[in-house]
Amino acid sequence: DAKTTQPNSMESNEEEPVHLPCNHSTISGTDYIHWYRQLPSQGPEYVIHGLTSNVNNRMASLAIAEDRKSSTLILHRATLRDAAVYYCILRGVNRDDKIIFGKGTRLHILP
Amino acid sequence: GAVVSQHPSWVICKSGTSVKIECRSLDFQATTMFWYRQFPKQSLMLMATSNEGSKATYEQGVEKDKFLINHASLTLSTLTVTSAHPEDSSFYICSARVGGYYTEAFFGQGTRLTVV
């Protein structure tokens, strides 16, 4: 099982960019990098995913290292509503498409 | 985006009774759904994979006779916690996928179960 490693927690000021790192040194060639977040007392919600190229959507950007052994989720302008636990997850054809959650990064936003 | 709805959002039951939690995909058909359990301050733990029309596949250490899963249609999966005990109190979350690993997954809002 390929594992992802994330910092336990991070802090950021409101309205500033946030860079959430994730290491996945044992990623396989068919693994997609997915990010989900969980707000307090809610189910997780999808944020973004990618394979090799950097990706942008209305919520965030995903920067993937050239060797794909690490990635960074970028929130361009954090708001208080972005305070959540962020999970970096690998999904691929060899994983029975199960979504296995690690411990994630708890993001605190300071007003 | 696609919506997954869980019912109820919270439930309190007496020890020894059974509780059923429903997970519905509202605007898409889900051949596969997943059930998770989450204890306070911990991450989500995958309990089982629910496949429409066939038996669920349980993760190691999860008692299949205690956590009954039924996926009778392409839009509904149910989790029944049988003979519930206080240690079964947890946050239960379901997930459904539209496509494969290259697409996003959708999660229900969760069900808070408290066994007294």
Image (cartoon, coloured by chain):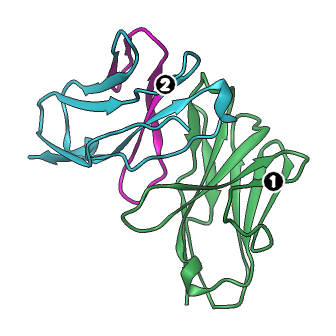
Chain colours: A cyan, B green
Inspect the image, locate mark 2, and give the three-letter code of the amino acid beneath it: Ile
User: Is A32 covered by the magenta stretch?
Assistant: no
| Residue A18 percent location from the top left of the image | 19, 31
| Of B13 and A54, the residue lying toward us | A54
Tell me where residue A19 sits by quadrant: top left
In the current view of this chain or complex, which residue is farthest to the right? B53
Q: Which residue is label 1 attached to?
A: B56
| Amino acid on which disc 1 is placed | Ala
Q: Is residue B27 left or right of residue B88?
A: right
Q: Is residue A37 magenta?
A: yes
Question: Gap between marks 2 and 1, in whole Å?
Answer: 28 Å
Q: Is residue A71 left or right of residue B90?
A: left
Q: Which residues are magenta?
A: A34-63
Horizontal side, residue A12 vs residue A74: left or right = left
Q: Chain of mark 1?
A: B
* Marking on residue A27: 2
Name the residue: 60% across, 24% down: B103
Tag 2 subunit: A
